Structure formats: structure tokens, C-alpha cells
Image (tube, rainbow, N blue to C red):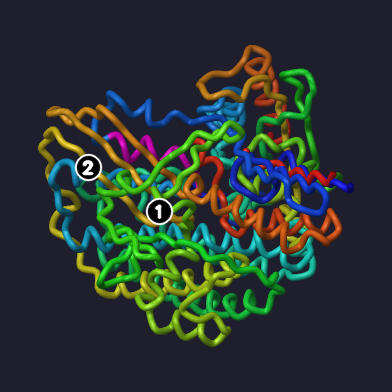
Amino acid sequence: MKSRTIKVDTLARVEGDGALYVKIKDGTVADVKFKIWEPPRLFEAFLRGRNYSEAPDITARICGICPIAYQMSSAHAMEAALGVKVDPQVRALRRLIYLGEWIESHPLHVFLLHAPDFLGYEDAIQMAADHPDIAVRGLQLKKLGNELMAFLGGREIHPINVCVGGFYKVPTKKDLLPFVDKLKWARDASLETVRWTATLPFPDFEQDYEFVALRHPDEYAITEGRLVSNKGLDIAISEFEEHSLEEHIPYSNALHSRLKERGAYFVGPLARYNVNFDKLPPIAQQVARDVGLGPVCLNPFKSIIVRMVETVFACDEAIRIIEQYEMPDKPRVEIKPRAGTGHGCTEAPRGILYHRYRLDAQGVIQEAKIVPPTSQNQKSIESDLWQFVRNYIDLPTDKLQWQCEQAIRNYDPCISCATHFLTLHIDRE
Amino acid sequence: MTGSKGAPGRPRTLIIGLGNEYRGDDAVGLIVARRLREAAPESVRVLEESGEGAALLESWQDADTVILIDAVHSGAKPGTIHRFDAHVQPIARKFFRFSTHAFGVAEAVELARALGRLPPRLIVYGVEGKSFEAGVGLSPEVEAAAQEVAERVLGEVR
């Protein structure tokens, strides 16, 4: 009988190096492997023996795209271990710098990495030649996110201003106000982009996912909340390890996560959207409804629309925070080291990023645990590929390969983070 | 991340060293940039960047002459110096694959070309690396090449 193999040794347009292997035998899917080649990063081992205060700056080095997420999860975990509560305005500023990271990360993925898939372009460069206005808008949006991060973080890549207990330096309200007009432009540009992404051709594909995201009673959760799923999970972040498992898989350098007795789960923009639609501001809910996206979306290809709905939210929320901001009396809380264990979990652009640290009485790190979003999504990525290839098995191999790569990009995988590289193979026998 | 801009009316020259400090020979662009910051004429701006493409597009938008220096991995002998003039040839993406960024140096140059936003003069120096493993320090071949690249770049901007 006929057999086919799809092999992509180095997947393009994903952050880091990974590969895909699909084997089709006698018209059925025989094997799917999503492989992460990038060598293990061993950050958890580097952290042992370092002072609690060093964790935000060390872990920020794990990723050049989402350093704020690492700083926030580590700072929150340390604050939990040390019994520290930050000033409400400091909390608001942290949410603001985090929104900057979303505004930087989402448009980069939507415009430069994912949209070319839908329009049949090899890459963003070809797309830009035909749609220069769209490429320029994407770059401008991303730039605004960078500016916000650089302004609050001290510099763009690997920001240095976030510390355990708060910030080294906080801005005045007057410093922040010039961002408001830019954010209003960005909110309009994002609304327009939601409408544009909704016109893209989407494969008919849905799965019965378990979506896991932070949920907070008063806001679209980013920096705090409980871990909640659409299927009944509702736990404190400190209970995460009791409910999840990490497994070493021979063909991947990143650990695979699953929920005990539940299996694969899905984190990131689509998960947040499905868990927290009611917490989006009216402007974001309205545009989602206008383009035919209800409160529940089970098609991972539509995550490109959801990323832009979240960008609308991010701009809107950043404006609100700046307008309500009052400079706190002190940028940070004084800290007295003590022994303890702390957990931090925040919504990185790609989904929940969990940190746990155990400190000794001097505040020296005895144990560190980091679970990045892409490792958590690996099982769902593979499950999508199994199902997608089953549904679309009659497609010519080149078209099937194209759509498998697109299905991986639905998750905006950050392989650099997860290993703590991408390549594609489809085998047909 | 921003330096002083050249006085208006004068040609604006920008040198950008790219790389990752902590991945062996990948740091060569950054190291060359640091040496040039001392040695280059005062009117020349010198930046260090990670190699994320969209940020690169931003950094060179007001410059007349841009010189990029980065480590490459093309299979040539370690320490080999490649020089590309972006207005004469496209920048081969395969050369600059040793970036974990999905949208890196080659993509930034080609996107700028597609959008009509290439600086009037854009030269890319690629230094063939030997080791890109985690760790600090250049291999001897790349260290020797770093010195030569710094001199050649100085020759271009004087």
C-alpha cells in the first residue's frame, strides 16, 4: 500500500529550532512527532545557590521575546515565599509593562509569522510586497509594545527595572501620559486588524480541548488569579504541581506536560479567551462578536483573530491603567530574607508560565522549577496534528505539510523557552 | 538602546553588532561593536542588538549608512569573513540561521527591501563561527577575524 512521510527538519517562522515528522501508512496516520531540538537550557540548575533577588534578571534571559513574563513569574514567586505584598500602583505598573509585552509579541506573530500561512505566502517578506500597509501596521504596533517595555523596563531586550518587591524606579504620571494617544491609535489599528484577520480562510477544524488559564474575579487575568479550565479545574497556583505531570519524551528536548487523570491541555490566547471572555472589556467583546467569534472558539487556526482581540484589550487596558495611575510613595517594598517556598504563575503571551522556588533562611535559592507555556502545549500540538492529518489525509503532500506547519504556528511555539529548534517530516508508506 | 543621532544634514552612519553574549562565537558582532565604539569617529553611532528583526528595522530607519556585523554558520572555515552589500545581492537566510529568532537579520533586510525602506547603504559583515554552544568567549579563529572585521569596518566609515 501507499505510504507517505512529511519531514520538516527545521520549521520556519517559529521562535527557536524544532521539527515535525508525520508518517502516513495505508491511508491512515501512523505516527506524529513534534520535536524540539534546541538543547536543554538548564536554567533551573543555574538558579540553585543564587540569591532570591537575582531570579528575575537571570530568568529574563531565557527568552528575548517574553522576558517580562519570566521576571513577573519569578518576582511573584519570590514575593509569595517572602511574605511580601506590593503596592496597588506597583501592581498596576507591572500589569502595564506586561501589556507592553503582549502588544510587542502578538503583532509580531500575527503579521510576520502566522498571516503569510493563510494567504499562501512563503514568508512575511513576500506578503509585504503585496500588502505593505499591513506589514507597516504590524511593525508599528510591535514598536509601541517595545517602547512601553523599554520605558518601564529600563531597556527593550532583557529589561532590568523589575525587582522582587516592586521596581527599582517608577515613572511619574506625566512620564506615562504621552503613551495614551499612541495606545488609542494602536487600539484602532488592532480593531481594524481583528476585522482583517477574520476574513482569512480558516480550515474547518475543532477539537474538544481543555483550556487552562488564570482567572481573576475583577479583570482579564495576567499577573494573578486561580488556574481554571473550561472543564472544571479550579485550583490555586500553589496546587499546580499536584495536578500536573511533566514527562520526558525521547524525541524532544522539552518536557511534555499533562494534567493528571485529564491529559493534554491547551494554554495561551485561545485558552484565556475561552476561560475569560466575560472579563474582556466591552470594546474587545463587541469586535469579537462583530466578526462572528462567540464566547467559545474551538478552532485553533482562529487564534490569529484571538491574538488581535487580546491586543485590542491590551491597548484598552493600558490606557485605563495610565489614566488611573498615581505614582506610589515607594517603588518597592523592603525585604527581609526568610526560609520558605513560593509559587508564581503569570500569563506570558503564549500562556501560563509557572515558577516555584525554595529559599533558605538567607534567601538563597535551594530549588527552582520553571514550566514554560510551549512545553505545556506540546501534547495539544501533537493531538491537533494527529486529528488534522486524519481529516485532511487526501490533500497533496505539499499542501498537507503547509497546513501542518500552520497548525503548529497556531500555538506560536517559543522553542527557546520550552527547552529550556523546529524541522517537519511527513512519511507516506 | 538609543544613542545620539548625528547632526541633521550630515551623513548618518550606524554600526550595529548583533549576537548573543552567552553562545560562544555568536557574540562576535557584539565584541566588534564594543571595539568600534572606542575606535570609530565620534559622528558614528554604534549599537548592540540581539538580532530580533523588527527591532533592527526600527534602529536603522534614520541612517544613511548602516553596517551590520553578525556571526554566521554557512559551513565555511571558522573565521572566514563574508561581506554583503544589500543593494547588490539579497541576504541569504541560510547564512544567518544561527539565530533563535523567527524573524532575524536576513528577514529584516529583505522586509526592508520589500517595503522600500532599505538604508541608502547597507553592508553586512558575517563572521563564520566555530562554536555556538552555551558559554562565554570566542574561539581563536573568530577572535582573529574579529580584529580584522573591526579594521575593515573602520576603513568603510572613515
Q: Chain of mark 2?
A: A
Identify which amino acid the numbered label 1 is placed on: Ile
Residue B153 numbered tag = none
Indicate the position of residue A292 as horizontal and vertical percent values. Answer: 57, 84
Q: Which residue is mark 1?
A: A352
Q: Chain of mark 1?
A: A
- Residue shown at 41% from the left, 60% from the top: A212
Rounded to the nearest angstrom, the CA distance separating label 2 from label 1 is 16 Å
Examine the structure image and report whether residue A63 is included in the region drawn in magenta: yes
Q: Which residue is mark 2?
A: A342
Q: Is residue A152 left or right of residue B115?
A: left
Vertical comparison of B147 with A117: above or below: above
Question: Are dots 2 and 1 in contact, CB under 8 Å?
Answer: no
- Residue shown at 39% from the left, 76% from the top: A280
Tell if the residue under mark 2 belongs to the same chain as the one under mark 1. yes
The 10 Å Cα crowd at callout 2, few under 14, some 14 to 19, many 20 or more, is: many
**Which quadrant of the structure image shows residue B25?**
top right
Taking the view exactly as shown, the residue that stands out farthest to the right is: A1
Examine the structure image and report whether residue A77 is included in the region drawn in magenta: no
- Residue shown at 78% from the left, 33% from the top: B83
Residue A55 or residue A189, whichever sits in front: A55
